[in-house]
């Protein structure tokens, strides 16, 4: 699958010593209020849902599916970043 805002590649499971093939997909989800959203015929998530359904019906074996990228998630009133990312907030055990 390859579209203007998505790219999906199949990696044979044998290459990665996996039991099943891996579909690795990168995507950019256009924000709802973007001017580009108005010209899109189908939402990106609907395209992926159709793609996964097609894979499920045509692929002989089970498969792994990884979807990553910029999903333009909304966080309401919360910050969309880590407020205090200092190491004092990370539970790290150092062993010598």
Image (cartoon, rainbow, N blue to C red):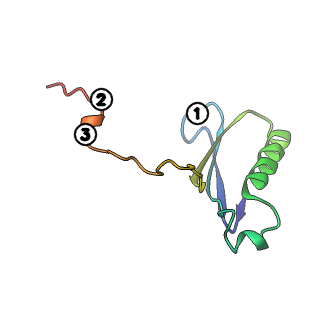
Q: Quadrant of the C terminus?
A: top left
Tell me: residue 95, above or below residue 15. Answer: above
Picture quarter containing residue 57? top right
Residue 31 place in picture, x, y as percent:
65, 63
Can you name the residue that lies furthest to the left here? Answer: 96
Cα separation, mark 2 vs mark 3, equals 8 Å
Residue bearing mark 1: 18
Q: Position of residue 76 (x, y in %)?
A: 57, 49
Q: Indicate the secondary structure of the residue bearing disc 1.
A: loop
Return the disc, 1 or 2, that comes first in the chain's sequence.
1
SS class, disc 3: helix
Residue 32: give x, y in percent of width and height: 69, 62
Q: How many residues crowd around disc 1 within 10 Å: few (fewer than 14), some, or many (20 or more)? A: few
Q: Residue furthest right?
A: 57
Looking at the image, is mark 3 or mark 1 earlier in the sequence? 1
Q: Where residue 29 appears, x then y in whole percent?
A: 65, 59
Q: Nearer the viewer, mark 1 or mark 2?
A: 2
Residue under the image location 54 percent in, 39 percent down:
16
Pointer 3: what residue? 87
Q: Which residue is mark 2?
A: 91
**Nearer-the-camera pick, 63 or 78:** 78
């Amino acid at each position: 699958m390859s579209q203007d805002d998505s790219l999906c590649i199949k990696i044979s499971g044998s290459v990665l010593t996996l039991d099943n093939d891996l579909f690795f997909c990168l995507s950019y989800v256009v924000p709802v209020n973007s001017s580009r959203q108005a010209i899109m015929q189908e939402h990106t998530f609907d395209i992926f849902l159709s793609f996964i359904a097609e894979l499920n019906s045509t692929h002989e074996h089970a498969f792994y599916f990884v979807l990553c990228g910029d999903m333009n998630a909304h966080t309401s009133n919360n910050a969309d970043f880590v407020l205090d990312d200092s190491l004092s907030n990370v539970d790290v055990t150092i062993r010598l």
